Amino acid sequence: MTEAGLPLEGVRIVEMTHMVMGPTCGMILAQLGAEVIKVEPPSGDKTRSLGGMGTAFFPLFNRGKRSVVLDFEKPGDRDSMHRLLATADVFLENFRDGQLEKQGLGAEELRRRHPHLIIAGHKGFLSGPYEHRPALDEVVQMMSGLAAMTGTKEKPQRVGSSANDIMGGMFGVIAILAALYQKRGGKRDGADIRIGLFENCLFLVAQHMVEYEMTGNKPRSMPEREHAWPIYDIFDAADGERIFIGVVTEGHWQSFCREFGLTEFLEDPALRTTTDRILARPRILPRVAEIIRQRNVAELSQKLDALNICFSPINRPEDLLTDPHVLRPGGLVSNFTADGKPFHVPALPVEWNGSHLGEGLKVAPLGADTSAVRAEIDKDDIASKAAGRPA
């Protein structure tokens, strides 16, 4: 897709964020065409140097952004920040309440000096009793009940990715797009947006909260849950691999039993309805497991795909780098680290007029765009003064 074809072309985002939630918001906006200027301290965003599970954080969530270094200990750099914000549509931040006030960038000061600005603060909690607390993805998963639903209350288990941080960044994008749309309708002032990591996780467990309120029954965790279908399980295959199979409709049940030689189930009058089969899972599953164990995953996948039955091998993330669907044109995009090394990333999970987003994005070296951005705001100041507008 050409740059001119991106929907947020001409929108300027100034970002002061770190870790995952705030940077995710900026990264998505950049892929949608916005100019995202990441303001970093002289030492750089701390996630630039993370290792281990944090190795991917900076390159993954900061692709496609410009990097500007400002030292807020220097009055001149604080002034440069405000001059930059005067040219921006959106300011992204994810600092604890009170921290930006110390640098002259608190919400009240920003509203006074830049009333046009959309301010999006990514926080641990929305306003309320917990608003002062810091939060992490794992913390809110424990607080919200998500960890107890993924594992059990006795052995809670966090989701195996930064799911809440990433989803929180997505809610930031949604709110920012709504604010930009409102301004497009003629609203001159900006907006003050707060996105909560904890409340994001509440949104994920809302189905279980509502279930309890409506039924009075405590929702069972995923390992303990009652099944709604006769076959909805993980099975061992002949090649030592494992496969998940979900037989969820009457047609699926009929075709599955015929294909895998389980006609005794079709002829059994005690298994006429789905409810009958669910109650009979203790005798159905051992027989199904016996049949599945005789075939390898590749053969099973081919048969189940032909029957249009839901299935999946039990993959690890590295397996996706050789998956034929992931490797289809546009499935993975090539991006580049700050030192020019290529890496491959799943494309943004949307197609825009048939095109995929995110190809060729680069991670800017620390401060790579400082001089250019300073020159741009100086030029804007000169143009404003010539036009008789306040700088």
Image: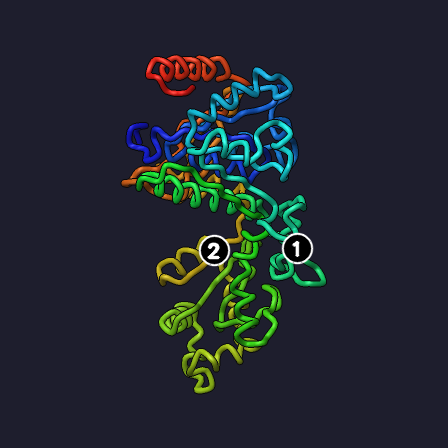
- Compared with 37, 200 (above or below) is below
* Residue 133 image point, x, y percent: 67, 46
Which residue lies under the disc numbered 1? 142
* Residue 54 image point, x, y percent: 62, 35
Which residue lies under the disc numbered 2? 312
The residue at the point 45 percent across, 79 percent down is 264
Q: Earlier in the sequence, mark 2 or mark 1?
A: 1
Q: Is label 2 in a helix, a strand or a loop?
A: strand
Q: Quadrant of the C terminus?
A: top left
Residue at mark 2 to residue at mark 1: CA–CA distance: 28 Å
Packing grade of label 1 (10 A; few <14, some 14-19, many >=20) is some
Most foreground residue, 263 or 67: 67
Q: Is residue 293 something one can see in this rendering? A: no
The residue at the point 36 percent across, 15 percent down is 383
Name the kind of residue labelled 2 in the image. Ser
Looking at the image, the residue that sits furthest to the bottom is 269
Mark 2 or 1: the one toward you? 1
Residue 97 sits in quarter: top right
- Compared with 307, 166 (above or below) is above
Q: Is residue 83 something one can see in this rendering? A: yes
Name the kind of residue labelled 1 in the image. Met
* Residue 388 image point, x, y percent: 35, 17
